[in-house]
Image: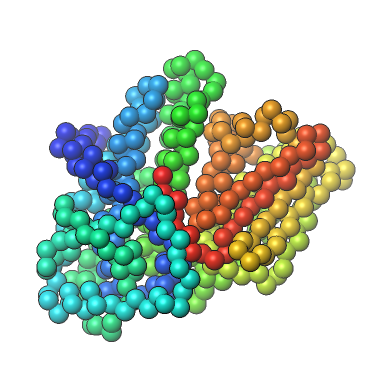
Amino acid sequence: MSFRISSALWDKIHHFASFPQTGVSLQQMVQFGQNPSQGTLLRASQFLLEELPVRLAHRAKELDGLPHNLTNMPSIQKVKNWYAQSFEELINFPPISLQPDIRTALDQGDISLLSLPVSTPNLKESAYGRIGDSNSVGINRGRLRIPIEKRYYARTSNTEWPPEVHDYNARFTKTLEAIKRRHDPTVTTVAQGVLEWKQHQKTQHIGLDVQAWLDRFYLSRIGIRFLIGQHVALNTLPPHPDYVGIICTRANVHDIVHEAIENARFVCEEHYGMLKGPPVQLICPNDLYFAYVPGHLSHICFELLKNSLRAVVERYGHDKEDAIPPIKVIVIEGKEDITIKISDEGGGIARSAIPLIWTYIDFNAPMAGFGYGLPLSRLYARYFGGDLRLISMDGFGTDVYIHLNRLSSSREPLP
């Protein structure tokens, strides 16, 4: 049975969409440590139970008011219903009742933030939170100004947490896992919706307003999935000395980039029927570590390397493997950023075509995905304060620069 959005639910969505979203930095997430207490996880659950409905409501409201009749495409309607259904499940999640002594232990956690760099707040962000009554932790319409560190993270005392706290954390984690599974096909479903709209409009191009919406929507999706994935990992994965949830506190840049190179070359060989893919030279210190999400960095490098591999193969020919010049990947650590430069001699891009590379196009091929690789990679880089830039020499090749914020102090750039 398909989900239908009632008028009462729409009222709640519009109410929650009136609240500002709250950004979290990588640094704040790492403060949990490798083995957080059940009390600390409960505080994180509280934050997500406040924050995720706000983020989902913003996106559901936007999906309902897209320009040029895009809202009415079947695939866009499907995604809108997913967001509304997840929103409803979260706002109706049963609250937990706590004894006064447990409530006191939860509220008096030691923050211990003075030794850490100051986080850079998102300019659009305002730190507000909803609170329940004195004994229950849940959602209501009250608003309270509370610092983000108090709401997302608190290192709770050595309290022996009662079984109901464990049960609450386990039930909330299962709900988040189900929501994450529901939204797994979002990127491809939205891409299908855009295709439906193009066919309906009989056009091959999308306007700047739709392009801007796709940027906002996908950036928000990265943030929602990261918060959920991080919380699920903290609650389900065994402690690891180098990981806090899905964040690796000692991510080895060389190893991540090398793996992305091998994966991209394999896809290239399979796609073009080559015995040996184009050579890729990696110049990177073996001992370069920083706190990051390996999956994000791997995704960025893999997508960009596919672009470079495709460019050189199509310029020199897949049957001239030994004549293809190497792609060079250079990694440098600066004071603020770790920068990765990927250089190819694939012929470059005409200057008039440069603006088009950041648009969402529809190449359904192994070496191009949905044509979303470059704009999505830029969003992943920007999510924690980095960036992605491209410089092309038409007739020669292209250089792409990935800037990663090594200080981990930037909050999410919330749309």
Is residue 45 visible in this depiction of the protein? no
Residue that lies at the very extreme toward the bottom in this rendered image: 158
Q: Residue furthest right?
A: 323
Residue 222 is situated, as x and y percent measured from the top left of the image, at 45, 49
- x and y percentages locating residue 356 in the rendered image: 61, 31
- Horizontal and vertical percent for residue 326? 81, 49
User: Which quarter of the picture shows residue 114?
Assistant: bottom left
* Residue 154 in view in this figure: yes
Q: Give the quarter of the figure containing the N terminus.
A: top left
Placement of the C terminus among the 4 image quadrants: top left
Instruction: Determine whether 95 is above or below 350 in the image.
Output: below
Q: Residue at x 48, y 60 (%)?
A: 410
Number of numbered discs on residues: 0
Q: Position of residue 112 (x, y in %)?
A: 37, 78
Residue in the image at 45% along x and 51% along y: 413
At a point 70% along the width and 62% down the height, the residue shown is: 332
Q: How is the image coloured?
A: rainbow
Q: Look at the picture and state if 7 lies above or below 95.
A: above
Please indicate whether residue 413 sits to the left or right of residue 158 in the image.
Answer: right
Q: Quadrant of residue 121?
A: bottom left
Which residue occupies the extreme front position in the image?
123
Q: Is residue 399 left or right of residue 124?
A: right
Q: Is residue 413 above or below residue 253?
A: above
Q: Is residue 31 left or right of residue 46?
A: right
Q: Residue drawn at (69%, 47%), measured in percent from left and top?
A: 400
